[in-house]
Image (cartoon, helix red, strand yellow):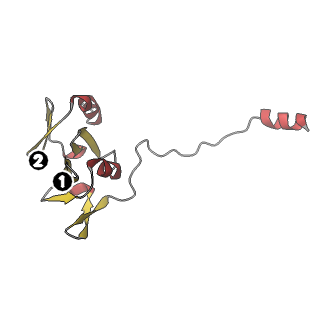
Amino acid sequence: AITKVEQQLNHTSTVVPVEQSSPIAQPKEDYIFIKQDGRMVKVSFADILFLEAKRDFTMIQLKEKKLIAGFHLKMLEDMLPAALFMRVHRSYIVKLSAIDALYGNTVELQGFQIPVSTSSREALSAALRI
């Protein structure tokens, strides 16, 4: 019986690799819901430019307007896809595709100037492939 088990353990089998998903997981949805004035508002990732921490809430700057979310920035960071958004400062998360310019420790997004921390600068450059 022991010999049979050893033979089965030593027997090499062919493993068919399972198709791996991309290293960056794609979100199932392309939006989040934010409570605004007593109602839930659907916010598309495509409309978000950046998020800014403001004490116990977060300001979400959209293309046309801004919203105030009753969440800490960290909670929203966990809800956003890492492939699209990056925390560039302890108080800011930016949408990578919305960045128009990067100079010094600042990024520019449609006229807004966002500070970039020294510790995030290298990761940001890598994410932008520059």
Q: Position of residue 97 (x, y in %)?
A: 23, 45
The answer for how far apart the CA atoms under marks 1 and 2 are is 16 Å
Q: Nearer the viewer, residue 115 or 109?
A: 115
> As displayed, is residue 33 above or below residue 17?
below
Q: Judge from the rendering whether residue 3 lies leftward or rightward of residue 63; answer left or right.
A: right
How many C-alpha atoms fall within 10 Å of the one at disc 1: few (<14), some, or many (≥20)? some
The residue at the point 89 percent across, 34 percent down is 3
Q: Label 1 sits on what residue type?
A: Met
The residue at the point 66 percent across, 40 percent down is 15
Q: Nearer the viewer, residue 7 or 80?
A: 80
Q: Position of residue 8 (x, y in %)?
A: 81, 38
Q: Judge from the rendering whether residue 107 lies leftward or rightward of residue 34; answer left or right.
A: left
Q: Which residue is label 2 attached to?
A: 110
Q: Nearer the viewer, residue 108 or 51?
A: 51
Instruction: Report if the CB atoms under discs 1 and 2 are less than 8 Å apart.
Output: no
Image quarter of residue 12: top right
Foreground tag (1 vs 2) = 1
For the view shown, which residue lies furthest in the front direction?
Answer: 56
Image quarter of residue 112: top left
Q: Which residue is label 1 attached to?
A: 59
The residue at the point 11 percent across, 47 percent down is 110
Dividing the image into 4 quarters, which one contains the C terminus?
top left
First in sequence: mark 1 vs mark 2:
1
Q: Label 2 sits on what residue type?
A: Gln
What secondary structure is found at the residue carrying circle 1?
strand
Q: Position of residue 59 (x, y in %)?
A: 18, 53
